[in-house]
Image (tube, grey):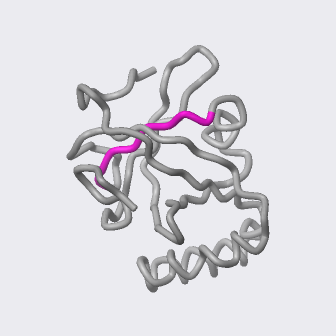
Amino acid sequence: MNEHKFDPAKEIYINLATYRKTGVSVNTPVWVAAHEGSYYVFSESKAGKVKRLRNNTNIKIAPCDVRGKIHGEWIEGQARLVEDQTEIDAMYPAFTKKYGIQMRLANFFSHLMGRFNTRTIIAFTLTAQSPTGAEPTKP
């Protein structure tokens, strides 16, 4: 699935860079899980990254800590917003297996607050290691 220098599925957090219409990237630390050849993240449907992905599906990812501090090279990829409920239902167990009680708690509170069904699932595949390993442009 991955011929790159790091495996996103083995990272606790990755930094997901999405692009504004101006081409400026915006970096966000997110959880990631792998399922059947794709990587997945989830987000509030009204989040900026979801809006940006509607305009531009190019992304870059890098391993990071909870605060987004990068500790590896960037890898380019392509993202898509997942609308197929069967695919959504199939990928959630990968998050539960990886994040355990953290994912169960996140889901519990998301259900409690009425936000679980407002999540948007983002799938992505990796295309190439960044040739320079350089960080995307910051706003």
Relative to 53, 37 lies left or right: left
Q: Quadrant of the C terminus?
A: top left
For the image, the number of numbered tags is 0
Image location of residue 96, percent across then percent down: 51, 81
- Compare residues 109 and 126 and report the one nearer the observer: 126
Residue at point 27% right, 44% down? 69
- What range is drawn magenta here? 57-65
Q: Is residue 68 above or below residue 84?
A: above
Q: Is residue 41 magenta?
A: no
| x, y percent for residue 57 | 61, 36
Quadrant for the N terminus in the image: bottom left
117 relative to 67, above or below: below
Residue 64 located left or right of residue 18: left
Q: Residue furthest top?
A: 22
Residue 96 lies, with reference to residue 125, above or below; the image says below
Picture coordinates of residue 41 (x, y %)?
54, 59
- Seen at 67% across and 54% down, the residue is 44
Query: Mostly what secondary structure, the magenta segment?
Result: strand
| Rendered location of residue 20, percent (x, y) | 59, 24
Answer left or right for 76 relative to 83.
left
Name which quarter of the figure residue 134 lies in: top left
For residue 34, above or below residue 89: above
At horizontal 54% and vertical 18% (from top left) the residue drawn is 23
User: In the image shown, does 65 or 130 lie closer to the viewer?
Assistant: 130
Q: Which residue appears at 54% of the width and 41% of the height?
A: 78
Q: Which residue is more in the foreground, 19 or 111?
A: 19
